[in-house]
Image (tube, rainbow, N blue to C red):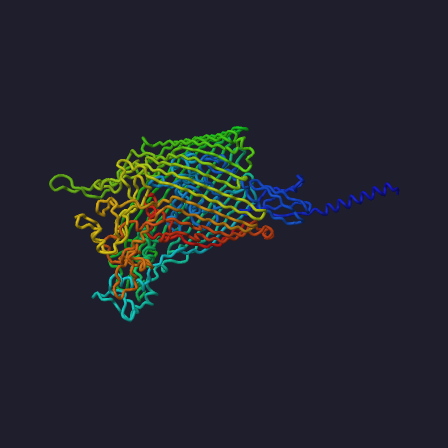
């Protein structure tokens, strides 16, 4: 063999050896790619070898991939909407990847009225909350989950009772009547969103100004809350379980005197010892007025402590339990996507017999019927059951605190000793049962490239039944409340609502221009029937007799049918020039059957402008500014939130009236109790706002600042009439106006540190001022909450020109009289003036003479503060490391006042039990011998302890008004997401465990149960009685353990 051939052969062998060596350095890398927030596998993610564009793969339905690359290669991973990642292989064969959503959220599409729009192009004021931020919060109501999440939005839980109502106000209180926003779910108007399962929600948008709300015109004067529920996505069928279980307890307990100290207080108050010489405590008086004492009945302190109220609070409260379990099945093909879900929520409240249960089922289906026609069908069914306890003026918690702690719960034979909180809970059976069914249909037809037609139709039905049964029971062996009968009450209401929309959308764009136009017609209607019945006297207290038909006497039945319809016409134009100059105009005309034909139609225009100055050529090199946008808007909105029969006169019959001369023969007739008014018209709200939106550093930092001014005119209200008119209620009329203005701030920073750490912090703050500017002819004030609690027989809230809606008013205290000389000097008897405090004694309040007329009269009542907060804020924070996430959320408010009715009872020794520390707080100018256990105190803020109140110390005054500011650690949640390398072996797509603390800490100076006080129970339909605490059911602190499992 020639030397040349040998050389060639050697070179060939070397090349083969080198090729084999190189090929040996290639390895197969496998793994799973998931979403960092939901831990759901990402189908269709692209994995490529950096520098080798031809070597790439796509993840399957389970988010799995396999790629062959050199051991020292770098993987490049991309997925739409997520930040690109580069990962060094480093010889590893298993690499699981967690993708983070792109920091730039400005290109997201958000819901606007009857459409979608890119977030950075919005010229109106819209706050957007992701469903991921609220899905896992352990609450029954969606509104509770939204509390503190958006600027300009104040959400207040009226009470902490399971299933209780929540109040929401967007940019202030716009009217004295119903100021709730309009609720829209999946594009259809609904009456409320309390029935929704928070875990079914994909996104929430809150429309706060006229530019964003005007297309809804009718009822949008107080803003719009638009909710999009979750839907199925193309891919394999996924089954997920989501549930939690936990416990709750009161976060605060009000300490009152035990029987021992209460006896000492009575001894001080009445000057008669309640103790025997050997230290035993007497309970009550016998027929001769002597204190009853019997060794055989063991009326000793230890017996009292075991069987009396020293423990009423503990007797009616318990450890609450809350749990929710839900399952979702979703998936689909290119032409059909589906999602079905079912959940069960169960909460046993912290007060005995208070419970709430809810079953939610939902099916959302999207189908491509042809190349030009798509269909969406959403269906839902909800079943709710609630058992309540007495609230408001008959609050069971109020009674539990002020009930005499020296009274027995039971006598020695087991009978109730008295009508006490426990006996009331045992006597009253109050239950609510509600069924709701809704169906929605949307058809989207592509008429041509530029034109789309949409048909939308919905129907829902709600049926509610309230049952209440009051037992008759023995208070002792011989006394069983003679003459009293069992009481049966039943209330039923059925509401049907339908809605039909026809919408035509035109969309065209080129390199410089973009135009979207909407024209549409809407129609909706509602019919409500209700009936309530009362009867008395069932055969017994047994459950089988808890029905109207079981009672035999006192039949009273009432009922009413009502309905309304409305139609609307919509027009909207959105224009963009060079993605820099933005314009939007809206017009809506609404006609409502609630108004007469002369006032039936209302017209609601709006216009808004936007300027993305960050897109100007002179900003081209400012790389750190992702978005800089100025926007301004103006518009009007309407409100028809009144009873559908408000324009009609109500008559009542069954009364006899004399007629004729002489004997005046009596004839049965009818009389008007509520006068109608055919001239009422739409309440209108004029809105102006101006704001800036910023995005910095690829929108890792976002910031918004905005000023708004909202004026409501032609308010629909009932102006007071003179009593001689003989009416139960004043006629509805358009009178008065109110103004809300303020500032909103929102900021958020979100970023990653390396590939394993992530963190975010946000802040939203609102400053809002409310002022009534007119109340119609004469500007007569409108009174709200009226308290008749012992000597409090005053209105405590008043709506008047120049003040906020529902302001507190009353007398102003000016210290306490320390001597008879001070009383005499203040009373000015010798001037012959009728001074109201002529019965005052040392230790009584001195009240200010506000109008300086030398007398204390009703004219001296004045403004004492507002229940409306000046500042409302929320602070969400979160940090994550690999599969571990910690989220923290604070919320609160400042600048509002609370009227604490409990002070009337617990500072007033004439009523019953009192605050435990009252012995050190009340005025005491002279201590009798033998009663030194109550200290001398002439520098007190609380009047002396007396069995009477001749000076009316406890009339409505600033003594009851407290600062309602608070900061609350609303949520603290720790979550662990199991790594995919473990789950893939178990054929599980995701598994997460979480521990959540809710309402953990509350920082406040308020002395009541809870500083978060909403509307008075029974007045939810208006805003005249906010912030009055009648011993409200407090919110609970809860701890829950949660599990998320995906298959």
Toward which corner of the image does residue 774 lie, by quadrant? top left
Q: Is residue 520 visible?
A: yes
For the view shown, which residue lies furthest in the right direction? Answer: 1
- Please tell me which residue lies in front, 852 or 880: 852
- Please tell me which residue lies in front, 92 or 332: 92
Question: In the figure, is residue 295 to the left or right of 31?
Answer: left
For the view shown, which residue lies furthest in the left direction? Answer: 662
Residue lying at 52% horizontally and 43% vertically, measured from the top left: 232
Say which quadrant the N terminus sits in: top right
Tell how many labels.
Answer: 0
Toward which corner of the image does residue 800 lie, by quadrant? top left
Residue lying at 27% horizontally and 66% vertically, measured from the top left: 930
Q: Where residue 278 appears, x then y in whole percent?
A: 29, 71
Q: Is residue 472 above or below residue 964?
A: below
Q: Is residue 62 visible?
A: no
Residue lying at 57% horizontally and 46% vertically, measured from the top left: 753
Q: Is residue 908 above or below residue 857?
A: below
Question: In the figure, is residue 705 to the left or right of 649?
Answer: right
Q: Where residue 768 appears, x then y in whole percent?
A: 39, 41
- Please tell me which residue lies in front, 489 or 521: 521
Q: Where residue 219 appears, x then y in whole percent?
A: 38, 37
Question: In the figure, is residue 609 to the left or right of 725?
Answer: right
Q: Where residue 44 appears, x then y in whole percent?
A: 59, 42
């Amino acid at each position: 063999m020639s030397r040349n051939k040998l050389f060639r052969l050697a070179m060939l062998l070397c090349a083969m050896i080198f090729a084999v060596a190189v090929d040996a350095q290639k390895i197969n890398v496998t793994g799973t790619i998931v979403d960092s927030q939901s831990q759901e596998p990402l189908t269709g993610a692209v994995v490529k070898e950096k520098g080798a564009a031809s070597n790439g793969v796509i993840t399957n339905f389970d988010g799995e991939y396999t790629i062959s690359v050199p051991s020292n290669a770098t993987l490049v991973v991309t997925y739409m909407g997520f930040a690109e990642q580069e990962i060094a292989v480093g010889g590893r064969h298993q690499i699981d990847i967690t993708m983070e959503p792109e920091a730039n959220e400005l290109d997201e599409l958000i819901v606007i009225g009857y459409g979608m729009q890119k977030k950075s192009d919005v010229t109106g004021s819209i706050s957007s909350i992701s469903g991921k931020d609220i899905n896992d919060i352990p609450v029954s109501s969606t509104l509770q989950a939204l509390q503190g999440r958006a600027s300009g939005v104040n959400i207040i839980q009226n009470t902490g009772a399971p299933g209780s109502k929540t109040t929401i106000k967007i940019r202030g209180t716009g009217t004295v009547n119903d100021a709730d926003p309009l609720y829209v779910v999946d594009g259809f108007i609904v009456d409320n969103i309390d029935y929704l399962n928070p875990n079914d929600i994909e996104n929430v948008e809150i429309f706060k100004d006229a530019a964003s709300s005007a297309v809804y015109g009718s009822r949008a004067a107080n803003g719009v809350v638009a909710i999009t529920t979750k839907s199925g996505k193309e891919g394999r069928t996924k089954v997920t379980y989501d549930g939690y279980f936990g416990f709750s307890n009161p976060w605060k307990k009000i300490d009152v005197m035990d029987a021992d100290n209460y006896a000492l207080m009575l001894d001080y108050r009445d000057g008669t010892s309640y103790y025997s010489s050997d230290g035993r405590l007497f309970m009550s008086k016998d027929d001769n007025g002597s204190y009853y004492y019997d060794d055989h009945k063991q009326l000793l302190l230890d017996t009292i402590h075991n069987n009396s109220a020293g423990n009423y609070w503990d007797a009616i409260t318990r450890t609450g339990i809350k749990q929710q379990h839900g399952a979702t099945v979703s998936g689909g093909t290119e032409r059909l996507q589906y999602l079905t879900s079912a959940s069960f929520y169960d909460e046993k409240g912290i007060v005995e017999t208070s419970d709430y249960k809810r079953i939610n089922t939902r099916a959302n289906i999207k189908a491509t019927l042809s190349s030009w026609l798509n269909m969406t069908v959403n269906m839902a069914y909800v079943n709710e059951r609630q058992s309540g306890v007495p609230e408001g003026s008959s609050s069971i918690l109020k009674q539990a605190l002020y009930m005499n702690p020296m009274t027995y719960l039971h006598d020695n034979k087991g009978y109730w000793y008295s009508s006490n909180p426990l006996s009331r809970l045992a006597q009253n059976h109050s239950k609510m049962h509600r069924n709701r069914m809704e169906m929605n249909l949307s058809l989207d037809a592509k008429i041509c490239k530029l034109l789309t037609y949409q048909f939308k139709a919905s129907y829902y039905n709600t049926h509610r039944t309230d049952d209440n049964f009051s037992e008759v029971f023995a208070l002792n062996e011989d006394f069983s409340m003679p003459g009293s009968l069992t009481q049966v009450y039943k209330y039923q209401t059925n509401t049907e609502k339908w809605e039909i929309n026809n919408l035509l959308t035109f969309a065209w764009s080129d390199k410089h221009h973009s135009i979207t136009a909407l024209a549409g017609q809407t129609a909706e209607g509602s019919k409500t029937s209700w009936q309530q019945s009362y009867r008395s006297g069932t055969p017994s207290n047994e459950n089988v007799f808890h029905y109207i038909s079981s009672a035999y006497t006192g039949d009273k039945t009432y009922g009413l049918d009502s309905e309304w319809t409305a139609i609307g016409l919509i027009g909207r134009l959105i224009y963009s020039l060079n993605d820099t100059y933005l314009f939007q105009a809206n017009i809506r005309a609404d006609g409502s059957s609630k108004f007469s034909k002369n006032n039936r139609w209302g017209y609601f225009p709006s216009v808004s402008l936007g300027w993305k100055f960050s897109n100007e050529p002179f900003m081209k090199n400012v790389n750190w500014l992702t978005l800089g946008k100025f926007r301004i808007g103006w518009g009007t909105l309407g409100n028809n939130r009144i009873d559908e029969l408000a324009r009609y006169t109500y008559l009542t019959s069954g009364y006899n009236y004399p007629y004729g001369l002489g004997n005046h023969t009596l004839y049965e007739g009818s009389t008007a109790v509520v006068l109608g008014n055919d001239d009422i018209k739409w309440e209108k709200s004029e809105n102006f706002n101006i704001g800036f939106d910023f995005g910095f550093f690829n929108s890792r930092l976002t910031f918004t600042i905005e000023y708004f001014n909202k004026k409501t005119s032609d308010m629909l209200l009932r102006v007071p009439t003179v009593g001689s008119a003989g009416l139960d209620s004043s006629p509805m009329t358009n009178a008065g106006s109110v103004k809300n203005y303020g500032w909103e701030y929102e900021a958020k920073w979100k970023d990653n540190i390396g590939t394993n750490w992530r963190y975010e912090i946000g802040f939203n703050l609102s400053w809002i001022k409310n002022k009534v500017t007119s109340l119609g002819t004469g500007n007569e004030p409108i009174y709200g909450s009226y308290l008749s609690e012992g000597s409090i027989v005053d209105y405590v809230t008043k709506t008047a020109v120049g003040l906020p809606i529902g302001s507190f008013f009353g007398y102003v205290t000016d210290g306490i009289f320390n001597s008879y000389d001070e009383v005499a000097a203040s009373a000015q008897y010798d001037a012959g003036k009728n001074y109201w405090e002529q019965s005052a004694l040392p230790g009584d309040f001195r009240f200010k003479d506000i109008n300086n007329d030398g007398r204390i009269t009703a004219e001296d009542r004045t403004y004492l503060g507002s229940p409306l907060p000046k500042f409302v804020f929320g602070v969400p924070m979160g940090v994550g490391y690999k599969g571990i996430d910690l989220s923290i959320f604070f919320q609160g408010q400042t600048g509002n006042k609370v009227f604490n009715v409990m002070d009337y009872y617990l500072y007033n020794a004439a009523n019953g039990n009192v605050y435990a520390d009252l012995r050190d707080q009340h005025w005491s100018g002279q201590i009798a011998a033998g009663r030194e256990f109550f200290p001398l105190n002439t520098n007190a803020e609380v009047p002396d302890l007396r069995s009477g109140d001749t000076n009316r110390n406890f009339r409505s005054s600033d003594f009851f008004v407290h600062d309602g500011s608070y900061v609350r650690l609303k949520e603290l949640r720790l979550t662990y997401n199991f790594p995919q390398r473990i789950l893939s072996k178990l054929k599980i797509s995701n598994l997460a465990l979480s521990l959540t603390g809710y309402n953990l800490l509350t920082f406040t100076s308020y002395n009541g149960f809870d500083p978060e006080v909403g509307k008075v129970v029974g007045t939810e339909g208006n805003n005249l009685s906010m912030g009055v605490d009648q011993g409200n059911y407090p919110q609970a602190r809860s701890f829950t353990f949660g599990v998320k499992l995906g298959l």
